[in-house]
Image (cartoon, coloured by chain):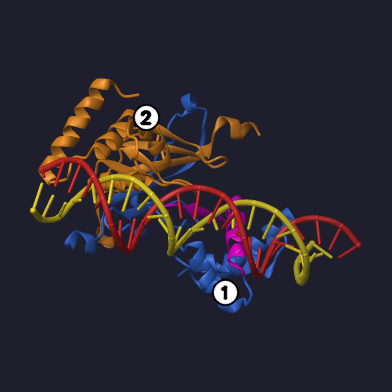
Chain colours: A orange, B blue, C red, D yellow
Amino acid sequence: MPSQRAVAERLAAFEEDCRRRGLALTIQRRAVFEELAERKDHPTADQVYDAVQPRLRGLSRTTVYRVLETLVDQGFARRVQHATGAARFDPVTERHHHLVCDGCGRLVDLDDSAVPELRLPDARGTGFRIDDYTISFRGLCKSCRQS
Amino acid sequence: MPSQRAVAERLAAFEEDCRRRGLALTIQRRAVFEELAERKDHPTADQVYDAVQPRLRGLSRTTVYRVLETLVDQGFARRVQHATGAARFDPVTERHHHLVCDGCGRLVDLDDSAVPELRLPDARGTGFRIDDYTISFRGLCKSCRQS
DNA sequence: CTCCGTGCAAAAGGTTTGCACTGGT
DNA sequence: ACCAGTGCAAACCTTTTGCACGGAG
């Protein structure tokens, strides 16, 4: 888990950004953002709901979905869709990559330092402006390799 | 679209692999595989269904889902999950990468030659055996940049 | 002839939407 | 006080599952 201090800093930055952009600072947004910032895994909307709901009686699943969408739109989080099933959400911190098991779909973070920096390719032909990248490494996790 | 010739070759290889592995060569499997091999986009299961169904009256959506899963399991296709919504299917050819628009979610192929070869990272700490990788470049497509 | 593969219908997720109310600004 | 944001319930879309039938090997 990130240090409490780092989380507090990010929460403060989040609050300031919200004010600057005129986004209402509701308890729900604060709580969802904080929950996301505290975790090092990639929770689904439902997992965020389960974690936050006890602290916020009456919180609605719908709201969690809507807040997460807002966070993604505003660049505070990223949506990580892997295999079939629920979307997972990742607080945006530094660039990192993913290791995905072809067998069971397990997803693990691989931090940037394990991977050489990549020069952004020339994509002029496609009309895209490239901002960043994420690498998905495919393979088999230990338990899938054993069976 | 890949050349008719290339498609025919891949269909033949597919049929031989099926025989060798004892997979029944049903019309449905042939048709779904052929449709996938002919396209250069990444169709959803539903798009495959819509494309194949007119030629194969009585084809069921369920079957398309099941055939696609078989193709993925057997290594004839890959599942590409991007943004929310339906999974997309990619006929496996060479390694290639993806360009994803943060604005509209559009996904475009970027072939391997545009990107320098990457040395597979050391993942011993994670217990994974890494086989390959795909890079997702994030950015904005032309039309999203203009608005 | 034997099963694997298919079709249908229904269920099972996951996510979105319409509408009325509430709480931030 | 206004309007963005929330809660609830219902709709929606994608995918999976149970079961009976049919066609490939």
Q: Which residue is mark 2?
A: A40
Residue B108 image position (x, y, % from top left): 36, 59
Residue at mark 1: B53
Observer-nearest of A105 and B113: A105
| Figure check: B77 above or below D7 | below
Residue A49 among those drawn in magenta? no
Q: Percent from the top left, x then y, of residue A6?
A: 24, 24
Instruction: Give me the chain letter of mark 1.
Output: B
Residue B77 magenta: yes
Q: Is residue A126 left or right of residue D22?
A: left
User: Considering the numbered disc 1 on the image, is that residue within a helix, a strand or a loop?
Assistant: helix
Magenta range: B60-82
The percent coordinates of residue B17 (x first, y second) are 67, 57
Residue A58 appears at what percent x and percent y?
Answer: 34, 39
Residue drawn at point x = 69 percent, y = 67 percent: B26
Q: Amino acid at mark 1?
A: Gln
> Is residue C7 or residue B134 the one in the foreground?
C7
Q: As rendered, which of A122 and A32 lies closer to the eye?
A: A32
User: Disc 2 residue type?
Assistant: Lys
- Could you tell me which residue is drawn at 57 percent across and 68 percent down? B34
